[in-house]
Image (spheres, rainbow, N blue to C red):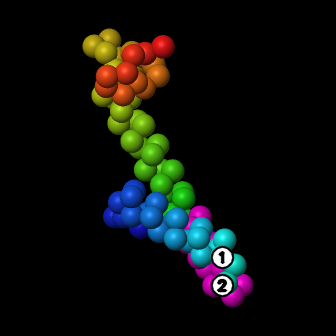
Amino acid sequence: MTDLKFEDCLARLEQIVSALEAGNLPLEESLKVFEEGVALARHCGRYLDDAERRIELLVKDEGGATTTRPFAPEGEDEP
C-alpha cells in the first residue's frame, strides 16, 4: 500500500464508502471492504502528516523558526 498515490487511495476510499452506504453487500464482504477502508484512511492520514512536515521544513526561516498564518490563495487579500 505504500506505493499508492494519495489520490488513488482517496478515490478507492470513496468507492468503499459508496458501497457500504448502499447496503447491498453481504456482511462478510462489508467487513472486508470496511477493513480495507480503515487501512486506506490510515495511509491517507500518514501521507497528509508527512506532507505537513515537508511544508513546515520549507517555510522555516534562516533561524529555524516557523511561523503559521492562514492560507490565502494568490490574488486574495488576507483578513
Residue drawn 41% across the image and 43% down it: 50
**Residue to which mark 1 is pinned:** 22
In the picture, residue 36 is in which quadrant? Answer: bottom right
* Mark 2 surroundings within 10 Å by alpha-carbon count, few (fewer than 14), some (14 through 19), many (20 or more): few
Disc 2, disc 1: CB below 8 Å?
A: yes
Q: Position of residue 19 (x, y in %)?
A: 60, 76
Disc 2 to disc 1, C-alpha distance: 8 Å
Identify the main secondary structure in magenta: helix
Q: Which residues are magenta?
A: 25-38
Q: Is residue 2 visible?
A: no
**Residue to which mark 2 is pinned:** 25
Secondary structure under the numbered disc 1 in the rendered image: helix
Residue drawn 31% across the image and 25% down it: 74
If the image is split into quadrants, where does the N terminus sit? bottom left
Eyeballing the image, is 8 above or below 60? below
Q: Amino acid at mark 1?
A: Ala
Q: Amino acid at mark 2?
A: Leu
Q: Nearer the viewer, residue 7 or 21?
A: 21
